[in-house]
Image (tube, coloured by chain):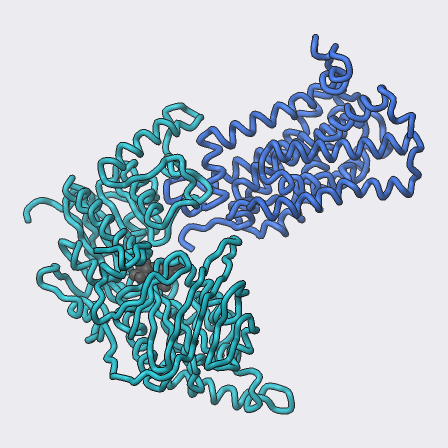
Chain colours: A blue, B cyan
Amino acid sequence: MSEFFTEAVLIATIASGIRFAVPLLLAGLGEAYGQRSGVLNLGVDGVMLLGAFGGYYTVLKVGNVWIGLLAGLGVGLILGLISAFITVTLKADQGISGIGVFLFGLGMSDLLFQRLVGTPRFIDTFPRIEIPLLGDIPWIGEMLFRQNLVVYLAFLAIPVSMVVINRTTFGMKIRAVGENPEAADSLGVSVAKVRYATMLIGGTLAGVAGAALAIDLGIFQQNITNAQGFIAIALVYFGAWRPLGVMLGALLYGFVNSLVIQWKTLGIITDSWSDFAAMAPAIITILALVVVATRFRAPSALTKPFERGE
Amino acid sequence: MADTPMMEMRAITKRFPGVLANDNVDFDVRAGEVHTLLGENGAGKSTLMKILYGLYQADEGEVLLDGEPVVIDSPTTAISHNIGMIHQHFMLVETLTVAENVALGLPSSKGAFTDLDVVSDHIVELGGKYGLDLDPSAVVWQLAVGQKQRVEILKALYREAHLLILDEPTAVLTPQEVDQLFGTLRQLTADGRGLIFISHKLHEVLALSDRITVLRQGRVTGHATPDGATRSSLAEMMVGREVKLAPDKPDVTVAEPALVVSGLEVYGDRGLVAVDDFSLEVRAGEILGIAGVSGNGQRELAEAIAGLRAVTKGSIEIAGTDVTNNRPIEVRDVGLAYVPEGRMKDGCIASFTVSENVLLVDHRESRFLNRGLFDFGAIREHSQGLVDEYSVKTPTLETPVRSLSGGNIQKLILARELEGTPTVLLASQPTRGVDIGAAEYIHERLVTQREEGTAILVISEDLDEVFGLSDRIAVMYEGQVMGIVDPATATREQVGLMMAGVRPELSP
Ligand SMILES: Nc1ncnc2c1ncn2[C@@H]1O[C@H](COP(=O)(O)OP(=O)(O)OP(=O)(O)O)[C@@H](O)[C@H]1O
Ligand SMILES: [Mg+2]
């Protein structure tokens, strides 16, 4: 146990916990936009997987991590559009269509990987960027300010989303459409447009989350997300549909994961114990969900397709 | 009058699958007047207004504004033509503030960012002018019903509505709130706006309207003005035959109290006290009406009596037996019949057939069982008997209840509940959303049941109903009895004040 409490290990644990939080944070934030507008998208994990493959494959071919990230974004945008078409235009059941998108992403990403890549090869990862001055602060600097650009951008997305949701007319429409689409419609707000917009934001962020995950690890493999897309959905409930809440949940998850990995590496816990420890985040989430469920209310129109005039 | 109407609908026809909702309807509004649209449930009033507001498209006919034909294909177009609509059911986003609800969908003076401060100032200004006091930063779910109504009107005024459609705006208001609303509406017409008013409440229609148009089954069946019409003449035009607005009630000598509620305390869904130290007696052979604005504990009281909600203090006795916190089936066995306010939710199972719904109460009785299994012959015979006796209009006994009209579902529930002369009948909102014809029938049935010696407790928001039916009226406010009055001597104003929480001894 003692070797864990060395400065270096503690700092590394926290720093990697923050990195681990990034895909969850991005995907969870995107899902929060959708849910605030009344759309439950269960396909996040599938979008992340395809975004991960798109990002990985692009970096493999082009050799540039940023173009890889953009590829993930593009994949997410397209899948967001497809999901929106299914749930908003076709008014399909959101639970089933989301599972469809997930299964599609799971199968398709593996198929493409087998066909186009076959044997896994490592790719470049994101370069670290040390922020001048801040990066020199002892402890804090190393934990927070020597991360890669995606980490900074992901955390920047939190305050941006808070402003968008709470202070803009677009955000007001999102909240209105998620709560009472009939009321919004009667004031000339296009429910479909708003939901398309949030689904596109959600898809894009999930695609970026997947690409960021693969490029950060420098590798792709089957089911690389390991259900992080589903955890992201749980985090939206955990975070009571608020960006800050989603961020807290993602960080909690990231830290616990990073801790488990450190302990395993240091031999503090055996493999079988680490399997139990790996469940800790899930258990914490369930407990937190119980608390949230009793205190906060989901958007009233969540999962309900909108059709004018009953 | 020579001047062109501000709005004219000509020969509007609208079909829904299997229903002709509007049939060749002409309707117009002049600036500065209130033109009332009157008609039974399903007459097509809301449909006509939704066409005017761009929510539905007419199959035939045209709309003219200031004499010019226009196409109104969406609410946005309607709003741009200065048409505003207050919908039958509130169209408010409960989790947003008053200002946000008003600003929703409008361009902001700050571009992409909201300009709620500007909106709030304008709300206060408009509110001051038209007697619509509101705190713009209040979150809507915290507002009282009357205040929500004001938000709806402000939404329309903020969008500079010159023609305002009010689809049953008074359905949920207390008499005082109605007076206040009418004050605002009169001010609006004085400013030259045109109003379309929809209501079932005939005395309101007579008080507010300049002109009245009556719709029946999608067609215009008559025109009237308040000075040439009476409540009965309007009712007759709506229904197409003479209607008794209040049932004839023969004298009945009341006997022992059959339902005794004492010191009752019940909690509501939000964990707050909903029924608070509530005491009441209903005697065999009397109808006691509970008046009150909904949300003052009536639902919780009914559920507690029916055994559906836990009682935390006090007791309930039926025919001398303590049934406090008994299971629903035990309460029924003692002699309670229950017509719940949620007809579709609690009163029946919408996807079940007519016979199955009849059986919901009787399924334990041996006459419907044959060696432990249902005896469908006996069940059918019994259901047919009830359907005939209560003239429930249904294609077959196997029709799912969902496809019956509200009035017929209510008759079926009543038939099921009144079987075998219950000791106590608890009927919540027995005629809400039911048309005048069916309501008349239900009222007559309740009166008959009273003659047979059942103690009847009627909970209703409809003051006409409470006054017409009751032998005594108890007014409920914030979970308590504000007072008990005699309908023969009390006035609507007195009861209205009590519904608003003013104790009778405090009022002059
Ligand atoms: N969207 C719809 N689809 C199918 N039928 C409809 C629809 N809207 C209304 N109807 C039918 O059209 C008829 C007229 O309904 P409408 O709502 O206009 O009546 P109303 O006069 O407003 O009644 P109420 O007093 O109950 O509000 C009814 O038979 C109703 O069932
Ligand atoms: Mg209507």
In terms of depth relative to the viewer, which is nearer, B170 or B86?
B170
- Residue B113 rendering spot, x and y as whole percentages: 44, 26
The residue shown at (59%, 42%) is: A83
- Residue A100 rendering spot, x and y as whole percentages: 66, 48
- B244 on left or right of B117: left
The residue shown at (35%, 84%) is: B255
Res. A111 visible in picture = no
The residue shown at (92%, 33%) is: A268
Q: Eyeballing the image, is A1 above or below A280?
A: above
- Residue B392 rendering spot, x and y as whole percentages: 38, 79
Q: Eyeballing the image, is B434 above or below B335?
A: above
In terms of depth relative to the viewer, which is nearer, B14 or B499?
B499
- A115 on left or right of B104: right
Picture quarter with ligand 2: bottom left
Number of marks present in the image shown: 0
User: In which quadrant of the rendered image does the C terminus of chain B lie?
Assistant: bottom left
- B189 on left or right of A27: left
Q: Eyeballing the image, is A2 above or below B491?
A: above
The quadrant holding residue A21 is top right
Res. A214 visible in picture = yes
Q: Eyeballing the image, is B454 above or below B465?
A: below
Residue furthest to the front: B505
The quadrant holding residue B386 is bottom left
- Residue A50 rendering spot, x and y as whole percentages: 71, 36
In terms of depth relative to the viewer, which is nearer, B321 or A260?
B321
Residue furthest to the top: A133
The quadrant holding residue B101 is top left
